[in-house]
Image (tube, coloured by chain):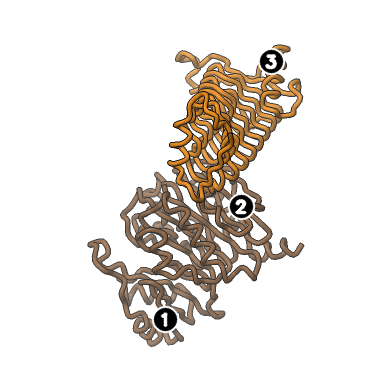
Amino acid sequence: MSVTVNLAETPLRELHAQLHALHEDSNETSWEVLNPRGQHAIAVGLTAPVEVTIRGHAGYYCAGMNQNATVVVDGHVGWGVAENMMSGLVRVKGNASQAAGATGHGGLLVVEGDAAARCGISMKGIDIVVGGDVGHMSAFMGQAGTMIVCGNAGEALGDSLYEAKLFVRGSVDGLGADCVEKEMEEAHVTHVAELLERAQINADAASFRRYGSARKLYNFNVDHADAY
Amino acid sequence: MCGIVGLFLKREELRDNLGSMLSDMLIGMTERGPDSAGIALYHAPAPEGAIKLTLHDPSGEHRGERHGERDWGAIASEMEAALQVHCTATMRGNHGLITSATDSDTARAWLARAHPEIRVVGYGQVMEIYKDTGLPIEVIDKYDIRAVAGTHAVSHTRMATESAVTTDGSHPFTATDDMCLVHNGSLSNYFGLRQWLRGRGMEIETENDSEVAAKYFAYRLSQGLPLDEALRAGFADLDGFYTFAMGTRDGFAVVRDGIGCKPAQLAETDDWVAMASEFRSLADLPGIDDAVLWEPKPGQVYSWRLGAAEQAAVA
């Protein structure tokens, strides 16, 4: 069953009350949200496996804390889209502002356009696929999960990186402290190809370069004081 | 927080709508800045050789008393007698607007001597600035902003961090003739920079960090730097975080600090260019669904000029 909610008429809290009341086996599995007009925190904290499509541009923290749901934004999003996502899928058809997918534990975030600075900051298991570029300090302190960038990356990619896996097809303005380029092996090509397919982004998996942690900042070492 | 907006109209047919388009944008920034609002309008140029002064008398404001009520006509007559030049006065809200057939240095010097209690909020041939405490919608109504026609405007809604909630502490801040600055963010080296600028002859009137930035850019421009380079010089000298929108006689510029601490959105159509802290302020603009929308990159200067835009539109 499909439900349409027009945010020009319905307060956002009312939409959330409806979405949060949904059970796992609800028949209302398809939701369309009209006139988001850049409002903040649209479709946050969802737990039911429903699909929510937002027609227009959303503001900050769209689809934050998502669990199980699929949220599609037919437009651009502001800061912190899919922040702390646990599972499910968030797809942005336009561009995302800063800190897309920040601290995410799981699920898949797809940004079809560009993502701005600090994309995937402190990512903890989320997978992020960006069709365009990412801004500076992306994957900062990334702990787990995979980030695939089909375009270019800004300065200080993967600064203070733990075990998040980074793949960039285009240029990288600079690597952050303790982030290094690593060899792209067959298993990595397979992994990238599988994620690109899930993200429905068309790119040649073999054309990406791999970046990861040199693992030299895990413990303080006076010989590396310059890197801090 | 704070919200900033800028609007630049490329087509002459749209200019009657400047005030109403800007008002909708400013109301969109209410949640980011509910304590005061200010608007710099570029419209109704004074005749060649004359300037406009937007004036406010803050006496009593810091004690929470009624303020700003002055006989601006009488002050214009005094100025006319003292300077021997033609002067006229009108009122908008509690600000006075005096048009004087002299240059801004002469008029401001006379005002500082004869009426030291009066603040010059804005000056120049084209720019007028109105600012006040209260919600954006209240300031818009009080100053009848919706009715204003013009070419471009920059505007600010304030959530104060670095100085008191007063008219003086509100943005925009005038940098020099026809040039003003609005700021989202806060600076941390402004005490030192203020001293440095005062040592170089710049007048700084308030305790506000953003006024220091405005006067810093004015100083760089007075050294002969073009606008874009003056704004870039700030990357080395201003410590803090900021998105600035600067209004100039014939255009406007947008710049974010190199880290990108504060947000900004730009939108452009064949008819207009608009910037705002967030999309919320752009949502009501006519033609927004077909506009090109993007986030300005940190550490990069974006600017538009009236002549250039018209040429681009024609081409």
Q: CA distance from mark 1 to mark 3?
A: 73 Å
Nearer the observer: mark 2 or 1; the answer is 2
Q: CA distance from mark 2 to mark 1?
A: 37 Å
| Point 31% across, 77% down: residue | B70
Q: Is residue A155 left or right of residue A227?
A: right
Q: Give how far across and how far down residue A115 sits, in percent.
A: 60, 36
Q: Give the secondary structure at mark 3.
A: helix
Q: Give how far across and how far down residue B111 sits, in percent.
A: 36, 75
Q: Which residue is mark 2?
A: B267
Residue B89's mark?
Answer: 1
Identity, as a three-letter code, of the amino acid under mark 1 = Ala
Whichever of callouts 2 and 1 sits on the residue coming sooner in the sequence is 1
Q: Residues within 10 Å of mark 3 (few under 14, many from 20)?
A: some
Q: Is residue B264 visible?
A: no
Residue A188's mark?
Answer: 3
Q: Give how far across and how far down residue B204 sits, in percent.
A: 38, 60
Q: Residues within 10 Å of mark 1 (few under 14, many from 20)?
A: some
Residue B14 in the image: above or below residue B70 = above
| Front residue (pair A100, A43) | A43
Q: Give the secondary structure at mark 1.
A: strand
Which chain gets the orange colouring? A
Residue B177 in the image: above or below residue A126 = below
